[in-house]
Amino acid sequence: MIGMTLELSDHWVWDNWVAHNGDDQHLFFLRASRALIDPDRRHHRAAIGHAVSQNLRTWTLLPDALVHSDGPAFDDLATWTGSVIQAPDGTWRLFYTGISRAERGLTQRIGWATSPDLIEWTRMTSPALEADPRWYETLGEGTWPDEAWRDPFVFEHEGLFHMFITARSNLGDPDGRGVVGHATSPDLDTWTVLEPLTNPAGFGQMEVVQARIVNGTPSLLFSCGAADASVSAAFGDRATATWVARGETLLGPWDMAGARPVQLPSLYAAQFVRDREEWALMGFTNEVDGVFVGSIIDPIPWSDDLLG
């Protein structure tokens, strides 16, 4: 099993992301009580937990960053994966996914919260960001169990803020419509949804998408389980996989046909992080011998040798 850096006796922990503030490294992660017994039930009980470290290995738990809101609201059932970025005025923004009770969690939207210190978070009252049916598949089309519009990854590039989103195209083979959704903002407050940055390439969904320039190469990192991909032959007998596609810039174009799986079968929702000035992977341990683990791993030094 991959080495564990954060394991809770009373909660499963899974998707996670890091924000740096001086010497402190803040880890945000999804968590749900193990009292649910069945780990599949965790998705509708998820809150966003929080911990801090100075070495990405020894963590001090902090109060949860966000839990589901009081209804009715787009996030009154659960809060899911997102990212954190510092705004130009020095405050922080947490972009996250919300699902609602009214829709039984089937429609995903993206909202955000603000903080002066990464500890206390206040939800914004702006409308949640939704999938635009001009380009993206919505729940009514009936080709997928839910409306995929989640896992916002926000970064600044050449004077504009960009959001990458787990989404599905409204065109192509329903088994492989996963794309990188895209939205832009001049100020982190007003967002414009644009057409996808990728075309369908055989992945039913591209989860927890992230783009970084890693060792000089623009690299697109995402996860997709074998059951959710028409390219599943590339997985062999593994249950899960994390993938890397190379690109020309942080906005692509990406060589999706040449995407390669990371040879760490229990790793899911991986993210590139800076560990002692070197690139590394962090994520969570998904399944081992068919059993869900739900713990966050120690950073794994990045090397192209990890790619299949």
Image (cartoon, rainbow, N blue to C red):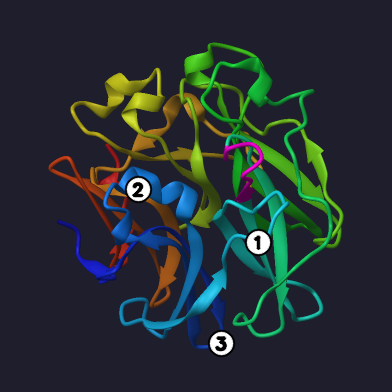
Q: Find the distance from the CA under tag 3 to the CA under tag 2.
A: 28 Å
Q: Nearer the viewer, mark 2 or mark 1?
A: 1
The amino acid sitting under disc 2 is: Tyr
Q: Which residue is mark 3?
A: 22
Pointer 1 or 3: first along the chain: 3
> Taking 247 as reference, is 7 left or right?
left
Q: Which residue is mark 2?
A: 268
Q: Nearer the viewer, mark 3 or mark 2?
A: 2
Q: Locate residue 245, reporting x and y percent.
A: 47, 38
> Taking 248 as reference, is 1 left or right?
left
Q: Locate residue 284, reporting x and y percent.
A: 33, 56
Pointer 2 or 1: first along the chain: 1
The amino acid sitting under disc 3 is: Gly
Q: Find the distance from the CA under tag 1 to the CA under tag 3.
A: 30 Å
Residue in the picture at 29% in, 70% down: 8
Counting other residues with Cα less than 10 Å from the Cα at mark 3, is it few (<14), some (14-19), or many (20 or more)?
few
